Image: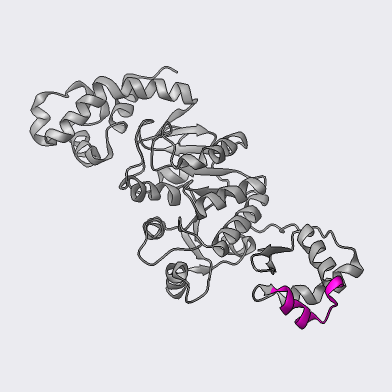
Amino acid sequence: MDFTKEQLARIWLQCAPMNAWNKLLKLKEKLGGAEQVWDHFTPEYYTLLGEEAFSLLADARANRCAKALGQMAALGANPLFFGAADYPLPLSRISHAPDVLFCQGALPADGMPAIAIVGSRSATRYGLAHAKRIARELAAQGIAVISGLARGIDAAAHEGALEGGGCTVAVLGSGLGDLYPAENKALAARILQSGGAIVSELAPDAPPLPYHFPVRNRIISGLADGVLLIEAKLKSGTHTTINYALDQGREVFALPGNVDAPGSELPLTLLKEGAKICTCGRDIIETMGWEKATPQQASFLPQEEEETADPILKALALEEKTLEELIRETGLPAGELGTQLTLLEISGKIERRAGRAYALRR
């Protein structure tokens, strides 16, 4: 792909390490743009930028820009320039939007509704199940799911969107050529194969440094119309995404959880402060005005067996139960109960858990 001198200069500045960006922004404002910085990058700016930033930028000009172009070509990635027709419109409207966004795959078309789903890396089984389910429900209705490809809630959200046959976008806190975490590389490949996208504002070879992630969170919320928080402690990196969402005028949703669970701290706090409650995809669809009937889950049980199974589903409505508790609460003989449990598990209505326990599949 051929680039203009101005585009090359913008890629050069974007490939500079993040800790030099603020000083580079001042230099761009002083000189009038990226191309002017390229043309006038002389030792006189050593004092303005400081030793570290000047050295990093000089290295980026001499080595990293050409390297980045080669890496993008190898990855099949393209730079999206702020102000260009292919730059995502929702992102262009936020404060401090990336001047260049490196992209693999295809972003959702402008106008396609999108929800960011975020939460803890150390998620509970409850959080993972609901993140996947809600993402699946949204994707099945043509709503894009945005997340960060991290362990825990992010990965579950991407998985759910893929199961729903929809579009999902992963926003990295590292470069496209240094995908993190490595355990999610297969998931990233599936996202691309499904027609989704992997994006980063960082140079393709940028490592996953801790301070990259809070900054990238503005892109996760910026690409979406709203943000759904699944699980997070009150003091967590996820809180930065919520703060960005509020600053950007995005709708904020939260999944309620057990009041004594650490992962419920931030969701419950947000709900008290006015966030919208979300227990299913329909809650988001109705709140956002994206009305479209959610398809009913097909039943694998004949009508008579559905009626027999009803006491089991009622018994599991609030929490998981052991086999012994189900025998006691439903009054069904052990043999018949076992048969119904097997059918319900096959149909996807319930799931088996440790200790001979069963629970509704959320």
Relative to 119, is 89 above or below?
A: above
The structure residue drawn at horizontal position 38% and vertical position 22%, both measured from the top left corner, is 69
Residue 308, percent from left and from top: 86, 73
Which residues fall within the magenta stretch? 322-336
Res 120 → quadrant: bottom left
Q: Residue furthest top?
A: 2
Q: Main secondary structure of the magenta part?
A: helix
The structure residue drawn at horizontal position 56% and vertical position 52%, both measured from the top left corner, is 156
The structure residue drawn at horizontal position 22% and vertical position 31%, both measured from the top left corner, is 32
Is residue 158 magenta-colored? no
Residue 76, percent from left and from top: 50, 25
From the viewer's perspective, tell me whether residue 45 is left or right of residue 260. left
The one nearer the camera, 343 or 225, is 343
Q: Quadrant of the N terminus?
A: top left
The one nearer the camera, 190 or 43, is 190
The one nearer the camera, 140 or 285, is 140
The one nearer the camera, 260 or 204, is 260
Residue 5, percent from left and from top: 31, 19
Res 45 → quadrant: top left
